[in-house]
Amino acid sequence: MSGAANPVQPLCPCEGEDPDKLAEFEQRITDGVHIEPGDWMPEAYRMGMLGMAEHHANSEIIGALPEGEWITRAPSLRRKLALTAKVQDEVGHGQMLYRVSQELGKSRDDMLRDLITGKTKYHNCFNYPAPTWGDIAMIQWLIDGAAIMNQKTLADGAYGPYVRTMNRINMEEAFHFKSGEDMVLTLMSGTRKQKKMTQEAFDRWWSVSLMFFGPHDKPDAEQRPAMRWRMKIERNDSLRQRFVNRFAPAAKDLGFTINVCEKDDRGFVTSVREDEQCVLDTDTGNWGFTDPDWNEFFRVIRGNGPCNAHRLDLRRFSYEQGRWVRNAIAKGGTTTPPAA
Amino acid sequence: MSKRRQQTYEFADELPTGKPDDTHWVVYTRKKRDGPARWAGYLDAVDVELAMQYAREHYGLDEACTGILIHPHDALHDCEYGIDPIEGGDATGDDGESWIVFTQRRRGMIHIEAGVVRAPDADTALARARAIHADGRITNIRVVRTADCTEVHPDDVPLWRDHDMTYKFARGYSKGVRSKWSNFRSDEDLERYRRGDIKEHF
C-alpha cells in the first residue's frame, strides 16, 4: 500500500522570494509544465514537496509492517508469495520516495532517524491492528484501493521526479489492489465463519478508509499552495466521495453490511449499527455515508492510536536487527547477528 | 508478536547519525533485448556490486526486464531542462570517449536511451548529442560516460523469472477475480465495473 500523502502542514506564503522568478514559476504550473530538480522553486514549494514525499516514504516503510507479520501465516503458498512480493514492493516504494526526498535536500539517514524517533509522521491508517487474515484482505482491497485513487491524482501533479516515481508505484499498487480484491472475493464466497471474519475486518477498516483521504478541506483549498502549485490536485472530500461511490456498492453486492462502529483503545469494534446514510442518491449519483470520527483521526495523528507505539517499536527493532548487516556491507566489518 | 519484539529499544548511540548518503545510483531497465534502456528509478549503495544486486532485486523483477543498466548519479550530465522542446545544434566530431545518450520527451516523463556519441568531455558530448537527437520533440538530453555505466543481461546473471510469477501482476488476478465477481454481479454490471477499473484507476 502506501500512504499517499495529503500534506496538512501549513505552507507559508512566499515572503522574500524574487517576485519575477515566483511569477514565472507559477505561470509554469498554470501552463501544466512539470518542475524538474534543476529548476528554480520557492522554498515553501521545496519544503512542501519534501514533507509530502518523506511522509509518503515513511508510510510505505511502516505500512509494510502489519502485512509483513502475516507472511508466515498466509493461508496458501500463492498468497504467501503474493504477500511477500507486496511487502517487498512497499519497501521498494519507500526507497524510491526517500530518493525523491533526498534530492529535495534531506539525507536518508536523517529521514530514518526522524521516523524512528517519531519526529516525522506516517499515514494514520497504519496505526490500527490487523488481527486476522481478513484484515490483510481489507488493507489490500480498501486501503490500497484508496491509495490508488489518491496516487493516480498525485501522478498528475507538477513535480517531475515525484510524478515519475508515482507512475511506477501505481503500476505495482494495481497488483496489490487486485490481489486484495481476489482475497475479499474468495473469503466472501467461503464459509459462514470466513464471511463473519471478513465482515468484522470490514467493520474495522471502513472508517479508516474514509479517513485515509484526510480531514475535510478548507473552503479555500484551491487557493492554498498545496493545490495552487499542483502538489496535490484534488480535494480530500472529492476523493473520499469517489472512493465511496466505487466501494460502497461493491461491498453491498458482496454481502457486507456497511456499519458505523465504535472502537475501544485497541482499535477493536465494541458496537455497530448499520449506516443508514449509505444509500445511493439518484439525483446526484453519489452514495451517502456517515462521516468517520474525526476526533479519533486527530487522536491517532497525535500518536495516541491503537498501534502507534507498537509500529515504531517494531521499526526500531528492525533497525537494530539490521545493524550488523549494514556494518558488514558499509564498513566491511565482520559482525554476527544478535542472538535470537 | 513475541515478547522480544515488544521490547522497547533505546537508541542513544545507534541512531543514524546524519552522515552523508551513500552513492546514489540511477537505474534503467530494458523491456526487450534490443530495446532502449528506460529509466526505472534510483537506489543508494556503497559500491557498484551492491548497487547492481539491489537493482536486480528491486527493479529486475517488477516488469518485463531483459537488462539492467546503472550509473552513479554524479556521472550524469543533463542539459538545461527546456520549457519548449529543444532544437538541434551544429556540433560535429567523433573523437574522444564513448557516452550514452538519454532523452526525455516531455518534462515529467522518463529518460530513454537514444544512442551513443563520442566526445572528449561532457559539454562536447551534450553538444554532439543535441545535434543528433534534438529534433524539436524532446525537452532534455542526458549523457553518461559509457565507462561509468554497468550493465547486465540475462546471459550474465539471472534477471527475470524462471517460474510462474503471475501472482505479482494485476493481470495475474483478472480471470479469477472476474469469475468470482460473476457469483455476485450480472455480466453487465461486471463489465461496467471492470471498465471503471481501467478508465479511472489502472
Image (cartoon, coloured by chain):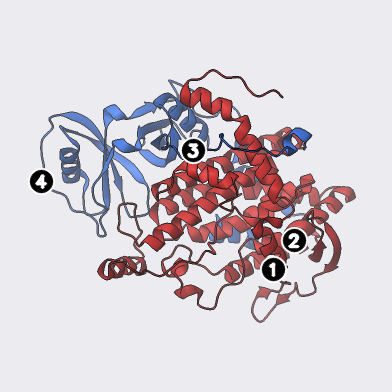
Chain colours: A red, B blue
Residue B60 visible in the displayed image: yes
Label 3 sits on residue: B17
- The chain carrying label 1 is A
Which amino acid, mark 4?
Asp
Which numbered tag is attached to residue A294?
1
Judging from the image, what secondary structure is the residue with disc 1 in? helix
Residue found at the very far front of the displayed protein: B12
Which amino acid, mark 1?
Trp
Which amino acid, mark 3?
Thr
Label 2 sits on residue: A251
The structure residue drawn at horizontal position 56% and vertical position 58%, both measured from the top left corner, is B201
Where A298 sits versus B114, above or below? Answer: below
Which numbered tag is attached to residue B90?
4
The structure residue drawn at horizontal position 35% and vertical position 27%, both measured from the top left corner, is B150
Instruction: State the CA–CA distance, disc 1 to disc 2.
Output: 23 Å
Instruction: State the CA–CA distance, disc 2 to disc 4.
Output: 62 Å
Q: Nearer the viewer, mark 2 or mark 3?
A: 3
